[in-house]
Image: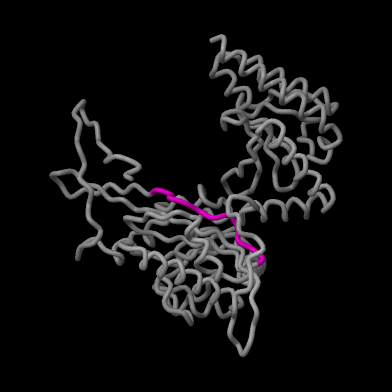
Amino acid sequence: MKQYSTPIIIQDNKIITLEKVSLNTDLYNEEWIKNICFQCPSLLPVEEIEPTFGGMIPICCELATESGYVDLIYVNESGFITIGECKLWRNPEARRKVVGQILDYAKDLSKWDYQKFEIECLKAYKGNKKSLFEIVHEFHPDIEEAIFIDNVQKNLKKGRFLLAIIGDGIRENMEELANYIHRSGNLHFTLALIEISIYKKLEGKELIITPRILAKTKEIERIVFRILDDKAEFIQAETQDFSKGESVSEKVFFERLEESIGKEKSLQTKEFIAKLSNELNIIAKLGRGKRLSLNLKSPDDTYNFASIQEDGEVWFYGIVSKTNEMGAKNIGIDYLRKLANIVNASFDDSKSEWHWSVKRNGEYLNITEYLNYQEDWIKLISETLEAIYRFEENN
């Protein structure tokens, strides 16, 4: 079933209908997709899939591995690697083949160390840089080489990759991919299907590209294999429900949180977030950007009740601005004032309205302090949601 219609352009009150460009021609093909994705990595909506992999830097095309040549390799300043494979999917057999192919590439890379990865990337790299760090450093002059190398090494060892299958005409049910994904071993990856649809005006050469995320898996882990005579035999998958579990970005967030506040408090934070989700349908949504954060948002994804930073600080974004948009600014202010009273802090309106928050002596409080008042905080969020719903019903 067609899930979306052909886009149009409105120019000078005139409707211009676009024509879909076929990607199965001599001019527009897999090679063309690969080149455009390499030249313009922001075309791929990676931050919507896995925020941790955002800020991709194109490293090379046609990276040689034991299983073949990888179409696209990206690395970001935090050392997270994205593997891109460009295919025009035309039949079920092609779908099975490309999924198996990209998983093989991921397994090959997971056997490499940093030195091997750098050597192979530089062989395929089209430029005059002499190291992988030098390529990335050009985009991010402030990063430290030792930290970058350690991060890449760690992600290679753990198999933490974003696997992006990019193409046109992609139609697939993620449950049907489970049979192919089981051959992935103990990698910790996210697999995403990204459709690149291209349109043009009926007259003219200007192209309009509309990338679209069709589907993505959660992290796949604890796949059990038996090794016999250097051959791997699949035994069982202990985790098969791809709708549950942590994504790579979520796992990285909680690892960093644990480093900052300790394992016990990090686990308590997870339990608190789960309780909010179970009792109030609160959405825990990772924020985008260089620094990871976890936003606690209303069930409709509109109102942000807190933003837990990776070091544990609790910030606030937009609760007052958003309630002001609906004509009830006092609801957002009351929420912050009451929360400040609960944790013995102050309502802070010293910055722009979007950043009005709870602070003590001008500093944000850590989640470890809020955990001491969990029940009061949950009750306050519940009461605030009820106030929002009542206002919406009456207006």
Q: Is residue 345 left or right of residue 79?
A: right
**Colour mapping used in the image:** one colour
Report x, y in % for residue 340: 79, 25
Q: Residue furthest front?
A: 235
Q: To which quarter of the image does residue 79 belong?
A: bottom right
Report x, y in % for residue 314: 73, 37
Q: In this orientation, does residue 145 appear? A: no
Residue segment shown in magenta: 212-222
Report x, y in % for residue 51: 56, 50
Q: Quadrant of the N terminus?
A: top left
Q: Is residue 37 left or right of residue 23?
A: right
Q: Looking at this view, is 19 or 135 the one in front?
A: 19
Q: Looking at this view, is 109 or 131 the one in front?
A: 109
Q: Is residue 311 above or below residue 130?
A: above
Confirm whether the magenta stretch covers residue 166: no
What's the residue at 30%, 67% (across, down)? Answer: 31
Q: Looking at this view, is 395 or 36 the one in front?
A: 395
What's the residue at 50%, 74% (across, down)? Answer: 104
Picture mark count: 0
What's the residue at 36%, 68% (across, down)? Answer: 93
